[in-house]
Image (cartoon, rainbow, N blue to C red):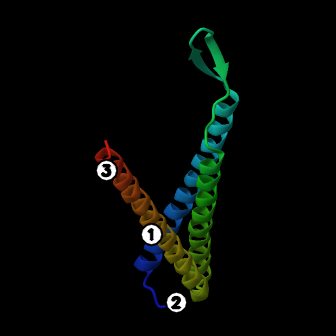
Amino acid sequence: MNFDDNTKQQMKSAATVGGIAAIISIAGSALGLVGYIIQRTRPAPVILEGFGNTTMPRSDNLVSTFISLVIAVVLFYFLNRFSTLVKKGIDGNISEHVTEGLGALANYFKTIGVLLIIALGLFTLAIVVVALAAGMR
């Protein structure tokens, strides 16, 4: 590789931070799933007229939890691949590994960009629906 020592050190540091971020991200998603399961099994108090306090199971959305978990796993894959390949490429002076690792980082950012565009589209759609609903009153 034709990188100076400073560039190699900075790339290795970025790969280390990326690896830590990937681990924290997947751990947070796993905790979110555990939290969902715990909340799902805990009944919620509901007050019904004439019947007093009763409990009903929570109706959290399993689909949104599953989608969040899939997104987290995909992002973890790209970020972890970046971290692993760049470290391996710099330690072994293998430019192909560094190139593949940077490609994985590019895919990570592309995925985040697509998800942000989807989220912005959904928020815009929600605002339009609320505005139309308010205008119909």
Q: Which mark is residue 113?
A: 1
Front disc: 1 or 2:
1
Which residue lies at the image location 61% right of the left edge and 48% below the top edge? 65
**Which three-letter amino acid code belongs to the residue tagged 1?**
Gly
Horizontal side of 37 relative to 91 (left or right) equals right
Quadrant containing the C terminus is top left
Disc 3 residue type? Answer: Ala
> What residue type is disc 2 on?
Met
Under circle 3, the secondary element is helix
Tag 1: Cα neighbours inside 10 Å, few (<14), some, or many (≥20)?
A: few
Q: Crowding near pointer 3: few (<14 within 10 Å), some, many (20+)?
A: few
Query: Dot 2: within a 10 Å radius of its alpha carbon, few (fewer than 14), some, or many (20 or more) residues?
Result: few
Q: Position of residue 90 (x, y in %)?
A: 56, 79
* Residue 61 in the image, given as x and y percentages of width and height: 61, 43
Question: Mark 3 = which residue?
Answer: 131
For label 2, the SS is loop
Q: What's the distance in space between the residues labelled 1 and 2, CA to CA?
A: 30 Å
x and y percentages locating residue 30 in the rendered image: 64, 47
Q: Vertically, is 85 above or below 43?
A: below
- Residue 13 visible in the shown view: no
The residue positioned 60% from the left and 18% from the top of the image is: 45
Q: Are marks 3 and 1 in contact (CB under 8 Å)?
A: no
Which sits in the foreground, 13 or 30? 30
Of pointers 2 and 3, the one earlier in the residue sequence: 2
Q: Could you tell me how many numbered marks the image carries?
A: 3
State the residue at coordinates (41%, 63%): 121
- For label 2, the residue is 1
Looking at marks 3 and 1 on the same chain, the residue that comes earlier in the sequence is marked by: 1
